[in-house]
């Protein structure tokens, strides 16, 4: 708060409030969608009246090491397992982060300043503005987070004392005594002609002295931010009442008309009556045309007149570095036809105006840089603060580098409404490497268990490295999976769950498959169910051999249609119990309780593929149910074969054509997909998944911009 600031003829108190605004995906969007975002930003600006002033702040700051370790680096496991591997991968994460943007991140803030008699009146105004800001930021695709007093002091501490400085919590009493200044401010400031010093830093404030007369690029802030310097960019905005603005523009037009008449008369007298247009092609003609256009914006296009100033503060460790960084910014400014001024002898005022403290009201002349440029709200919005959304989830896995921001992507699929994902790419593009790295990160960073369906025997070395279980599925395999193993209750709260009843669905599908994918008839269903219940009543852990024996008993004890049906079912089952395909007729002899399980189906013959995959998926479902009851996540990786499972699914394939989109299971797995990785694919190869609800979330847009490891 600032007290007794002259607002017109009255004195008032100024109150400010800051909001953190996460970035949105803007630069990667098509031009039509960028226009939609800009219009939403214009609506945001138009929601303020002439009593308020707004600061848009872009703060390029170094990453806090402690925060980095908490949010990004993988935690070492309590049992000490994989300690060496975790340390090695944390080193990779650190190097990637520092290499991307020299360990610099950009935070964006909106600070609103309002005049009010007291705190209660100011709070009422802020509530009204916040409802408007929340609505507009939602349209932009982000959210607005109000900052508390301690968080605002933390920003100043980051600027003046460094991001790694510890800052204790400041109490209300300490704020009343203004003790926060001692905690966040440097020991001294020394202001020179065109730069200043504080602590061990050199700093300089510059402002946009002249803007281009033609079109303004919406990438100017993006270009400056990507120089990877520690800096603050502030756009201070004041709003002129629309009626006053229209009167002002009309007066300007009248003055220009008068000047035009005067010059025309002078030219006519000089040319002895011959008509000569003295303003054609001159600055006056250009200004007059712009004034008429501005008036049309105010009257017919719901635009507002804004008074803007653009200030940049850069810091460096030495004066030489400061000069070098200054020249870098001047080059960018010249490219955009902008003239930068070093604010000679006004560094202190510029410094006060650049901080996200709400020192943006031009009436506060003692603290403000009195340099303003008149723009429409639409022209103001063209100086767009948005670039690309950063995807850094706490506890997220490393997926590569965002090509737009050159920062790492740390992504937690569990936070999505649908955690399923697909990896597309031409041969050799890195699909397998991507999947393996995600598996390794999952092993090191989470407690999730990994299940892999491996048709090419590609993931065996990975499973062996992490002491996983490899289950070879084939007609001649010595490893066995018992399809009659019962599935635990996946929902302990469901007291009506019966594992034997749940097994009936599998057996019906099983008999349908061995009989040529025919529909099971009612009489057959009854016999299959009766035999199943008798088998589980007689045996503790039955196999298909015991089921076959019970089916044979039913056949011998029955007559007529029941006997013929039982005989037909038994004959169909004989090949898979006593015949050449009896690999699934034995007790399970594999350890599926290991954290990593690979189902090697490379040698599974075509005649056994349908049945083999059915039994494997039943076995996987049993594992998922057990993990769910224990509160453990399950990650399933399937290459070129997709099924619907209650787990986090990753599909891996070379072409999208490999996926059968007509399969209802695929539609369920791909519906509302939020993660999609594409590696070295031709533009013609990538098409949106057809006949599936489109959900191009910001996370999905980032994965389209992912750069390989």
Image (cartoon, helix red, strand yellow):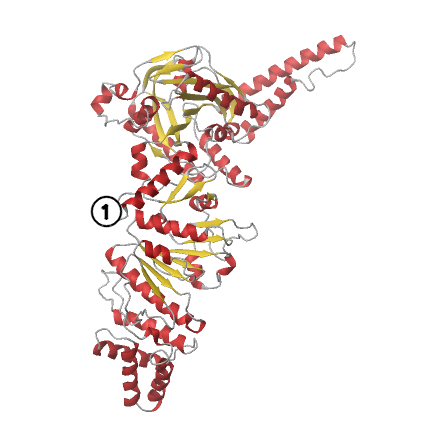
Residue neighbourhood size for the residue with mark 1, other residues' Cα within 10 Å, grouped as few (<14), some (14–19), many (≥20): few
In the picture, the quarter occupied by the N terminus is top left
Q: Find disc 1 in the rendering and name its residue.
A: 80
Q: Position of residue 234 (x, y in %)?
A: 43, 24
Residue 699 placement: quadrant? top left
Nearer-the-camera pick, 167 or 522: 167
The answer to whether residue 77 is above or below residue 244 is below
The reply to whether residue 321 is visible in this rendering is yes
Between 664 and 201, the residue placed more toward the observer is: 201
Whether residue 7 is visible here, answered yes or no, is: no
**Relative to 503, does residue 573 appear above or below in the rendering?**
below
The mark total stands at 1
Quarter assignment of residue 296: top right
What is the x, y in percent for residue 203? 40, 18
Viewed as shown, does residue 630 lie left or right of 345? left
Please tell me which residue is depicted at 34% across the width and 56% down the height of the picture: 463
Q: Is residue 60 left or right of residue 496?
A: right
Give whichever of 148, 286 is nearer the camera.
Answer: 148
Q: Secondary structure at mark 1?
A: loop
Residue 429's place in the image compared with 497, above or below, is above
Q: Position of residue 567 (x, y in %)?
A: 35, 86
Q: Residue at left 39%, top 76%? A: 512
Along the line of sight, the residue nearer the viewer: 464 or 108:
464
Instruction: Choose top left, top right, bottom left or bottom right for residue 453.
Output: bottom left
Q: Decide: is 682 above or below 73.
A: below
For image coordinates 45% across by 15% down, the residue present is 370
Give how far across and how far down residue 85 sits, in percent: 31, 46
Furthest residue to the bottom? 560
């Amino acid at each position: 708060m600032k007290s007794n600031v002259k607002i017109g003829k009255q004195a008032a108190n100024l109150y400010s409030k800051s909001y953190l605004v996460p970035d949105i995906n803007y630069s990667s969007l098509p031009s039509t969608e960028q226009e939609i975002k800009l219009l939403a930003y214009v609506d945001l600006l138009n929601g303020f009246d002439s009593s308020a002033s707004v600061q848009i702040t872009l703060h390029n700051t170094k990453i806090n090491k402690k925060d980095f370790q908490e949010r990004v680096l993988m935690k070492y496991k309590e049992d000490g397992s994989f300690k060496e591997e975790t340390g090695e991968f944390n080193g990779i994460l650190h190097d990637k982060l520092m290499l991307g943007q020299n360990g610099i991140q950009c935070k964006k803030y909106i600070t609103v300043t309002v005049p009010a008699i007291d705190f209660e009146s100011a709070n009422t105004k802020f509530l009204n503005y916040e409802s408007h800001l929340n609505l507009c930021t939602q349209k932009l695709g982000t959210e607005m987070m109000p900052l508390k007093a301690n968080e605002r002091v933390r920003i100043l501490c980051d600027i003046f004392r460094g991001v790694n400085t510890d800052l204790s919590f400041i109490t209300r009493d300490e704020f009343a005594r203004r003790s926060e200044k001692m905690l966040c401010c440097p020991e001294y400031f020394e202001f020179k002609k065109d730069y200043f010093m504080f602590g061990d830093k050199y700093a300089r404030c510059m402002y946009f002295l002249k803007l281009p007369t033609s079109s303004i690029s919406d990438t100017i802030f993006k270009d400056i931010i990507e120089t990877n310097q520690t800096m603050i960019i502030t756009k201070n905005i004041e709003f002129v009442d629309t009626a006053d603005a229209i009167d002002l523009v009309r007066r300007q037009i009248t003055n220009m008309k008068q000047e035009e008449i005067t010059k025309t008369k002078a030219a006519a007298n000089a040319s002895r009556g011959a008509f000569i247009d003295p303003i054609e092609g001159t600055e006056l003609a250009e200004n007059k045309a712009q004034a008429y256009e501005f008036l049309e914006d105010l009257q017919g296009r719901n635009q507002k007149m804004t008074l803007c100033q653009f200030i940049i503060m850069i810091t460096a460790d030495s004066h030489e570095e400061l000069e070098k960084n200054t020249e870098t910014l001047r080059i960018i400014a010249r490219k955009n036809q902008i003239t930068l001024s070093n604010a000679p002898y006004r560094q202190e005022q510029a410094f006060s105006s650049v901080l996200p403290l709400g020192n943006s009201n031009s009436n506060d002349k003692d603290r403000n840089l009195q340099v303003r440029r008149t723009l429409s709200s639409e022209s103001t919005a063209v100086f767009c603060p948005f670039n690309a959304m950063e995807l850094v989830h706490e506890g997220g896995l490393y997926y590569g580098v965002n090509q737009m921001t050159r920062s790492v992507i740390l992504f937690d699929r569990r936070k999505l409404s649908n955690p399923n994902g697909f990896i597309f790419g031409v041969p050799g593009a890195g699909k397998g490497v991507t999947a393996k790295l995600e598996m390794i990160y999952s092993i090191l960073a989470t407690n999730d268990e990994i299940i892999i369906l491996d048709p090419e025997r590609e993931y065996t070395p990975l499973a062996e490295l992490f002491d996983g279980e490899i289950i070879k599925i084939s007609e001649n395999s010595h490893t066995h999976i018992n399809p009659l193993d019962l599935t635990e209750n996946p929902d302990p709260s469901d007291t009506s769950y019966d594992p034997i009843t749940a097994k009936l669905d599998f057996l019906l599908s099983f008999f349908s498959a061995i009989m040529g994918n025919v529909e099971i008839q009612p009489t057959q269903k009854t016999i299959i169910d009766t035999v199943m219940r008798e088998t589980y009543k007689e045996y503790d852990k039955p196999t298909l051999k015991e089921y076959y024996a019970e089916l044979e008993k039913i056949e011998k004890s029955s007559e007529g249609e029941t006997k013929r049906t039982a005989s037909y079912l038994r004959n169909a089952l004989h090949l898979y119990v006593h015949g050449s395909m009896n690999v699934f007729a034995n007790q399970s002899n594999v350890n599926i309780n290991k954290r990593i399980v690979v189902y090697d189906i490379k040698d599974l013959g075509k005649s056994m593929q349908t049945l083999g995959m059915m039994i494997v998926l039943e076995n996987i479902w049993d594992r998922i149910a057990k993990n769910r009851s224990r509160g453990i996540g399950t990650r399933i990786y399937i290459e070129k074969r997709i099924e619907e499972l209650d787990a986090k699914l990753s599909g891996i394939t070379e072409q999208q054509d490999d996926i059968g989109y007509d399969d209802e299971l695929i539609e369920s797995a791909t519906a509302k997909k939020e993660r999609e990785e594409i590696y070295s694919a031709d533009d013609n190869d990538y098409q949106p998944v057809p006949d599936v609800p489109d959900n191009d979330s910001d996370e999905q847009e980032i994965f389209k911009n992912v750069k390989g490891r």
